[in-house]
Image (cartoon, rainbow, N blue to C red):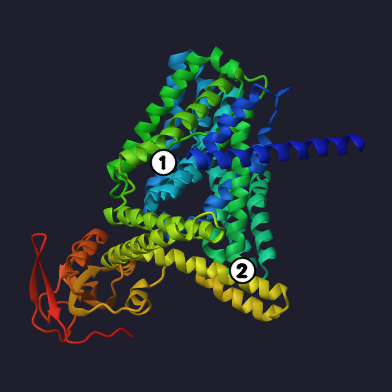
């Protein structure tokens, strides 16, 4: 019993030390703008030189304890609507892509290193699992298009499961020394399909349970049981536990929140965000700590072949299968190719290879070599590649506003500092009275410059409005908490009010066009109306972009064209001189042709005046003069 207590204390010390290291790395990564996960790996490598004993990590620890929260958190936050658009391409990369990687990488390893084909195929299967955590984190920081994030993350979620299934099949074939195609295909479908089925059933059951309960802590506990339980039940039933976790997370993330209160949604999201951060921190430190640099040096040639094979097959997979995707930009293909990092799953699979397996040490060296290369080389260079390809475009207005805002804040800080010095007697009143008008004049000038820029660029203004709105809601939430703790309001009133604030915080989209019209003390003159016809598939994009830019748009059902196809007629109020901005938004947010209404009989039957043609960018846009404009 005493020995068990000693083991527990040692484990506690080790975990606390790892968390302390992760904390330091997190601070340094933000300070020097490194990818956080890459910094953890580097720190782990540094610590290998000073550790006193060899660190032995069980693959069950990684796959059973650390991987489920990572997969569940990512799957929980993926919306089915976002996934549906590129689901075909994601499945191509996750199933045929994994099979292609297994076969071609295995063949290249067999040819380049002389390793037996059976053993080489085991390596091909384990290296097929991607882990773009570092890249996805960078995407969120830089504001890369969400669809690209979904493509990379969706591929990783599903190909992790299929790669583990493929690895199990290849390892079994290598150990038995015989291969049966029919039997292997049946096993693949059984294990993968079984994992999907288990995840689907458990996800639905958990979501139904959440819908019947109104307790944030209990509902969070249900999601925790679901994440780890899906993996354990899947493994007990000899199907894919990883795919069970992924599917359970997607189902629960899309169905479960409907039965959650706004407060519960915030609690659950924060819990899983921290859980994923914790698991990530431990995993990437472990990758660094368990890497034996001497073994890597001894097997540098085999590692070189493995890296080249992995990169080459990744190129074939991405550039080949993306031909079947819907309008995938070439720049995105480059990012998907270079973003195919390897990480925790590869490490766990490599460590799970039996001790007496032929050439196990060389397989481990190759796996660790590829993981380190993708994390250190590809992970570090992704930021540069994203910027080089100009995936994140900041407008000149945004850049100029940041400059003016920074000048305004720095001027105010300097003024307040000198005022405080004068108050303390460190600066003479004579000097301060000479400098004060200078700072005041500059403050007024900078404030006016900022207001002019915001008035001319509603999108920039909306970003700041949204930040201010959220900050105000957070302060309200904090104040309500203080009132409740001080006994000023009852538990029931606190719950009602905090629910209102949390619901406002979880709103994805706010109609800022109305706020801009009436909420900040000015009213823009609407003197024209534009009527345009868009297809139903484009409607959501158009409405969101219009509202983000501060324009109101009222949709009316209509039909037209061949076979009277359903479409939508939008009535858009045009502020003076803003026709070009609206047309630009329409052209960018519509994948299909936009039709501009040219007469009262075109599209919907509306009592509009005679259309006035306006030349914009070589195109003729028809607008209608109006006498009054009201929003209801």
Q: Nearer the viewer, mark 2 or mark 1?
A: 2
Q: Name the residue at 20% across, 69% down.
A: 578
Identify the residue under disc 1: 93
Identify the residue under disc 2: 478
Locate residue 617, reporting x and y percent: 11, 60
In the displayed structure, does residue 27 sit left or right of residue 549?
right
Q: Does the rendering let one see residue 174?
A: yes
Locate residue 523, reporting x and y percent: 29, 79
In the displayed structure, does residue 632 sit left or right of residue 207?
left
Q: Name the residue at 43% across, 15% down.
A: 111
Bin the neighbour count of mark 2 within 10 Å (Cα to Cα): few under 14, some 14-19, many 20 and up. Answer: few
Locate residue 93, reporting x and y percent: 41, 41
Q: Name the residue at 46% across, 57% down.
A: 413
User: Please, is residue 123 above or below residue 584 in the view?
Assistant: above
User: Please, is residue 69 above or below residue 462 in the view?
Assistant: above
Front in this rendered view, residue 271 or 209 = 271
Quarter of the view holding residue 168: top right
In the displayed structure, does residue 141 sit left or right of residue 456?
right
């Amino acid at each position: 019993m005493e020995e068990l207590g000693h083991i527990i204390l040692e484990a506690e010390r080790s975990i606390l030390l790892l968390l302390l290291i992760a904390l330091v790395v997190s601070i340094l990564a933000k300070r020097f703008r490194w990818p956080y996960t890459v910094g953890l790996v580097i720190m782990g490598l540094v610590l290998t030189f000073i550790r006193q004993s060899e660190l032995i990590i069980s693959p069950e620890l990684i796959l059973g304890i650390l991987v489920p929260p990572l997969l569940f958190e990512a799957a929980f936050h993926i919306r089915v609507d976002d996934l549906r658009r590129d689901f075909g391409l994601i499945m191509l990369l996750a199933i045929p892509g994994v099979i292609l990687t297994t076969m071609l990488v295995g063949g290249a390893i067999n040819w380049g290193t002389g390793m037996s084909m059976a053993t080489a195929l085991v390596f091909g299967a384990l290296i097929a699992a991607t882990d773009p955590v570092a890249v996805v984190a960078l995407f969120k920081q830089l504001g890369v298009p969400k669809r690209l994030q979904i493509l990379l993350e969706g591929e990783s979620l599903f190909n992790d499961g299929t790669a583990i299934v493929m690895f199990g099949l290849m390892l079994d074939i290598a150990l038995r020394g015989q291969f049966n195609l029919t039997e292997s295909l049946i096993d693949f479908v059984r294990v993968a399909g079984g994992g999907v089925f288990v995840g689907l059933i458990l996800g639905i059951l958990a979501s139904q349970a959440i819908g019947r309960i109104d307790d944030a802590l209990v509902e969070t506990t249900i999601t925790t049981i679901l994440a780890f339980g899906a993996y354990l039940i899947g493994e007990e039933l000899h199907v894919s536990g990883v795919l069970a976790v992924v599917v359970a997370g997607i189902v629960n993330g899309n169905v479960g929140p409907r039965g959650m209160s706004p407060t519960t949604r915030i609690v659950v999201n924060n819990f899983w965000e921290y859980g994923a951060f914790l698991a990530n921190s431990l995993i990437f430190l472990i990758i660094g700590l368990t890497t034996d640099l001497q073994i890597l040096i001894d097997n540098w040639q085999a590692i070189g072949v493995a890296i080249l094979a992995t990169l080459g097959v990744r190129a074939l997979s991405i550039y080949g299968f993306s031909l079947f995707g819907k309008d995938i930009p070439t720049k995105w293909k480059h990012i998907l190719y270079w973003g195919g990092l390897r990480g925790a799953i590869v490490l766990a699979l490599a460590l799970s290879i039996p001790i007496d397996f032929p050439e196990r040490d060389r397989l481990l060296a190759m796996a660790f070599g590829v993981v380190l290369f993708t994390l250190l080389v590809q992970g570090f260079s992704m930021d540069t590649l994203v910027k080089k390809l100009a995936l994140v475009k900041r407008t000149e207005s945004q850049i100029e506003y940041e400059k003016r805002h920074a000048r305004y804040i720095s001027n105010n800080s300097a003024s307040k500092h000198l005022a405080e010095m004068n108050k303390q007697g460190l600066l003479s009143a004579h000097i301060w009275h000479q400098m004060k008008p200078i700072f005041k004049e500059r403050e007024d000038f900078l404030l006016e410059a900022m207001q002019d820029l915001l008035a001319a660029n509603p999108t920039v203004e909306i970003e700041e409005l949204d930040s201010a709105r959220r900050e105000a809601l957070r302060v309200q939430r904090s104040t309500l908490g203080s009132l409740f703790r001080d006994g000023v309001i009852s538990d029931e009133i606190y719950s009602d009010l905090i629910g209102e604030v949390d619901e406002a915080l979880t709103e994805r989209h706010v109609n800022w066009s109305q706020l801009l019209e009436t909420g900040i003390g000015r009213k823009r003159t609407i003197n024209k109306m534009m009527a345009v016809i868009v297809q139903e598939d484009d409607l959501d994009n158009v409405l969101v972009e219009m509202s983000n830019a501060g324009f109101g748009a009222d949709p009316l059902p209509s039909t037209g064209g061949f076979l009277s196809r359903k479409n939508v007629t939008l009535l858009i109020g045009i502020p003076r001189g803003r026709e070009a901005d609206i047309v630009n938004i329409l052209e960018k947010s519509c994948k299909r042709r936009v039709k501009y209404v040219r007469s009262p009989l075109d599209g919907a039957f509306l009592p509009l005046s005679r259309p006035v043609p306006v030349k914009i960018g070589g195109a003729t846009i028809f607008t209608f003069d109006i006498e009054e404009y009201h929003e209801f």
